[in-house]
């Protein structure tokens, strides 16, 4: 392993939001920028200074000096590109989702294990301020026993790149699924999902998907029964952008802010059982959510703030997500440090599969009229490459 990593950033639409973070990370010594659009490639390279550039992923993979590749390509290419990176003997980070079929999920897992290199799915919600804060409340025992989890992701995808047209909503559900499963520290076991709403014929054709909205109920793998409800909307739904998850506990409930740009979740509590005659009293308060820049090296800590985007925020997903809750530098740091420390990343191939497969199975259920679908487990195979 070289003293400092050479990272290639592939796909500079959303990927541009990570370029300057890699540039300033203390463990990254070289950065290659890769995009098929020469204007976009030249613009970002010119802004950041002198960097190597490439027009294709093949060019990147042919460069023996590149240690790791961060993919920000289109959803239909995620599995294929991840396989290519791993088979080229390079560490791989990939934006969500991991894949859009169970077979492709298994193929990426197998490739990761054959290669011995790291794979990390770059799920923003796992490092968003709201999620980190909710975990602190959980660890302090604020919620008591968990009773239910709920996640939602509403986003209108009209006029985005062509591959989005008619995409099954649950194929891109990790922003809602991941924080719920990570919070409960478990995986989904089974799902019932129903599709809802009307969609234009030209949107139905690309994927054979008739649903603009899908809603699912998952049974989670826990000793005590625990359900997770997920709603995902991509088209024809008059709702402002939101990625949210809600925690319903015996002693307290945390509900995410409802409006884009609002950063104050609400904590509900019930008075102690038996404190007074009659119904228990409820109370609520808006909570201040701190930043978590202190967890990062000082060279990249400022990138948790949306105000520090410095020209990196042109992509709609960054504009809408407000920097995705300050998650971007945390994702970069975890990917880089996992390589430097020769350990699995926090969102390795199994965890990525556990957060992606529920959406794939949910869409299968919706196409079957809500029939139950089992969500496979991916941690049963021995992984000798981690020895």
Image: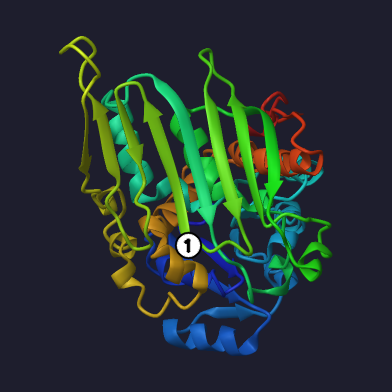
Dot 1: few (<14), some (14–19), or many (≥20) neighbours within 10 Å? some
Give coordinates of residue 250: x percent, y percent.
Answer: 35, 21
**What kind of element bears circle 1?**
loop
Task: Name the residue located 31 percent from the left edge and 59 percent from the top edge.
Answer: 262
Give coordinates of residue 58: x percent, y percent.
Answer: 75, 70
| 340 horizontally vs 326: left or right | right
Quadrant for the C terminus, please.
top right
Task: Name the residue located 74 percent from the left edge and 36 percent from the top edge.
Answer: 370
| 59 horizontally vs 136: left or right | right
Would you place residue 252 above or below residue 115 in this image? above
Would you place residue 196 above or below residue 301 in this image? above
- Identify the residue under disc 1: 241
Would you place residue 2 above or below residue 17 in this image? above
Residue situated in front as seen by the camera: 100 or 297: 100
Q: Is residue 98 visible?
A: no
Give coordinates of residue 305: x percent, y percent.
Answer: 30, 64
Would you place residue 223 above or below residue 384 in this image? above
Task: Name the residue located 70 percent from the left edge and 41 percent from the top edge.
Answer: 194
| 296 horizontally vs 233: left or right | left
């Amino acid at each position: 392993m070289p003293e400092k990593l050479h990272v290639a950033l592939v796909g500079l639409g959303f990927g541009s939001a990570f370029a300057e973070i890699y540039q300033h990370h203390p463990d990254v010594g070289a950065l290659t920028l890769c995009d098929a659009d020469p204007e976009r490639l030249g613009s970002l390279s010119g802004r950041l200074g002198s960097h190597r550039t490439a027009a294709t992923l093949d060019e990147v993979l042919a460069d023996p000096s590149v240690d790791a590749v961060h993919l920000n390509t289109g959803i239909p290419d995620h599995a294929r590109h991840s396989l290519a990176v791993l088979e080229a003997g390079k560490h791989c980070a990939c934006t969500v989702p991991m894949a859009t079929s169970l077979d492709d999920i298994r193929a990426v897992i197998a490739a990761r294990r054959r290669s011995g290199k790291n794979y990390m799915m770059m799920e923003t919600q796992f490092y968003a301020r709201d999620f980190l804060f909710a975990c602190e409340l959980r660890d302090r025992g604020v919620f008591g026993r968990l009773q239910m989890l709920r996640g939602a992701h509403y986003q209108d995808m009209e006029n985005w790149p062509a591959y989005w047209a008619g995409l099954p909503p649950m194929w891109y559900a990790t922003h809602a699924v991941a924080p719920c499963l990570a919070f409960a520290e478990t995986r989904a076991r089974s799902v019932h999902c129903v599709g809802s709403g009307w969609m234009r014929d030209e949107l139905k054709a690309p994927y054979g998907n008739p649903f603009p909205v899908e809603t699912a109920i998952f049974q989670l793998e826990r000793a005590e029964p625990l359900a997770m409800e997920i709603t995902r909307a991509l088209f024809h739904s008059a709702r402002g952008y939101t990625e949210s998850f809600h925690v319903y506990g015996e002693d307290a409930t945390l509900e995410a802010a409802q409006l884009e740009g609002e950063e104050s979740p609400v904590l509900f509590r019930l008075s102690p059982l038996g404190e007074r005659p009659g119904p228990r009293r409820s109370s609520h308060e808006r909570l201040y959510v701190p930043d978590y820049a202190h967890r990062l090296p000082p060279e990249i800590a400022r990138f948790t703030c949306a105000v520090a985007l410095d020209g990196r925020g042109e992509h709609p997903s960054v504009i809408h997500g407000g920097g995705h809750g300050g998650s971007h530098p945390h994702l970069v740091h975890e990917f880089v440090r996992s390589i430097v420390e020769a350990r699995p990343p926090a969102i390795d191939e199994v965890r990525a599969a556990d957060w992606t497969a529920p959406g794939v199975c949910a869409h299968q259920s919706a196409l079957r009229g809500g029939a139950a679908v089992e969500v496979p487990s991916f941690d049963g195979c021995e992984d000798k490459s981690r020895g």
